[in-house]
Amino acid sequence: MVADGMEWLVAPQYWLARLVFQRLLGVVYLVAFISAFNQFAALAGERGLLPCRPYLRRLGFRRAPSLFHLHYSDRFARATAALGIALSVGVVAGVVERLPLAAAMGVWLALWVLYLSFVNAGQVFFGFVWETLLLEAGFLAVFLGSADVAPLLPAALALRWLLFRLEVGAGLIKLRNDPAWRDLTALYYHHETQPIPNRLSRWFHHLPKPVHRLEAIGNHVAQIVAPFALFMPQPLASVAGTVIVVTQLWLMASGNFAWLNVLTIALAAMAFDDRFLSNVLPVSPPAVAAPPGWFAAAAVLMAVAMLALSWRPVRNMASRHQVMNASYNPWHIGNTYGLFGHITRERLEVVIQGTDDPVPTSETEWKTYEFKAKPGDVRRPPRQVAPYHLRLDWLLWFAALSPVYAQAWFLNLVSRLLEGDDETLRLMGGNPFPERPPTFVRALLYRYRFTTPSEQAQTGAWWQREPVGLYLPPVTLRLPADHRPAPAALSGGEPGTRHGPRRKHEPSDDAPKGR
């Protein structure tokens, strides 16, 4: 039982909020581990595009804590992801919350350790903002408790504080970095130029400009104004949570942002008390016991630690030179966040092609590698893939934005395609060379835009595209490495020549971070 005089730590009025948060967090963990199961070996495995073993050996455990320091094989990585999937299913099914308190905490801690192992080994492929957000939220979830004990106020407030930093950080970086957010024109471009559009993105893009300006105003309200009400008494906190949830649902409808929106909604759930949630959920909070003293003490220590770790992200948010999406420690707790600080005004796409001709000529037929979601074939409609995360598709958007993002891994991707590597090909949307690998691979840069409704009615195409230039000259495995053509985009060719004009606002702070 909580000691006398410490009853204020107990917050039974957030039992339903905890239930919603934990179930949604379980869904996010499930998707994240499925993504790791399917993609980690190809991206960072034994023959991945950026193998993790030399990387972890170089950094050491203190700089990149991970279970894969103990042992790494692709089979072990899949087993680790499978364990995470199993534990996540237990959370979603409500099994974990029925466990004794210590056991439930152990499961949440295990989920955090397992996913931390992938993030710290996955390098740029696991450096997206929603990876670190999941780790910080997952760590705080350890202190929420199981279904038979009342939630603790420090844990609930720590999760609101995380949501505050996420939203305000994203709002400030927009206002500081790009005039399009200040003059309310950012959404003139965003739906078309976002990394992975979905099937509704084209409809959103063609909304009237006054609606786009209202979208920008709504974004500023949700990210700059509403978060301050998260710490006010009810019902103001619930109103703030509602504003944030509605905004996230709008974002989910208009694009693919992996599990960011679902996780943000999960965090916003902690703003609602049981009186509010009981109006929308067919669940009645049960009578629960007060948490034991040791659990309350652990939650208080966590809250004190979070206050100490918050100094750097708060200082960063207050800075005129705000940095976006940074982790200040290898445990990814107490991070700083931000999104779309720069809006791209045009959409460039890297299109990878291969041929089985022995020597490419002007008559060569080049076949295109399609991807699972990123635009390629102009007649293929965009897909809804979120909350699943297609890491290679996302990184190719950054690669087109600025060649610096592809330096570490793009030639490795091309080499795997020339080898016909099965793991790599599973990341693609199809293999145009099912019999044998191509002899040459090249990459072109195209400018894409959504077709207008009349253009789509005439052609059936979702996109119009025009060539910009050569991103990577034809390369082959048959030549020694020192005789292969240098990739123009990856060796910093002159602007406006082989790989087209440089983009404005590059490199982008939105890019995933590697160590």
Image (cartoon, helix red, strand yellow):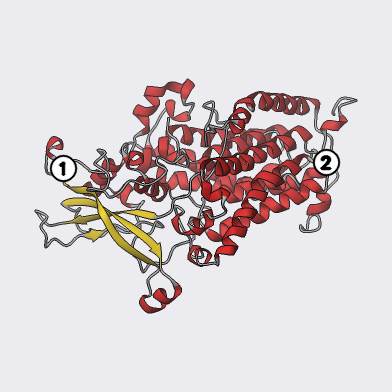
What's the mark number on residue 143?
Answer: none
Quadrant of the rendered structure where residue 513 is?
top left
Dot 2: within a 10 Å radius of its alpha carbon, few (fewer than 14), some, or many (20 or more) residues? many
In x, y percent, where is residue 426? 35, 52
Residue bearing mark 2: 12
**Residue type pointed to by label 2:** Pro
Would residue 16 appear left or right of 495 to someone viewing this image? right
Q: Earlier in the sequence, mark 2 or mark 1?
A: 2
**Residue type pointed to by label 1:** Pro
Dot 1: within a 10 Å radius of its alpha carbon, few (fewer than 14), some, or many (20 or more) residues? few
**x 44%, y 55%: residue:** 193
In x, y percent, where is residue 48? 33, 39
Residue bearing mark 1: 485
Would residue 84 appear left or right of 196 to someone viewing this image? right
**x 80%, y 26%: residue:** 293
Q: Nearer the viewer, residue 238 or 47?
A: 238
Mark 1 lies on a secondary structure that is: loop
Q: Nearer the viewer, residue 513 or 142?
A: 513
In x, y percent, where is residue 154? 75, 32
Cα distance, mark 2 to mark 1? 66 Å
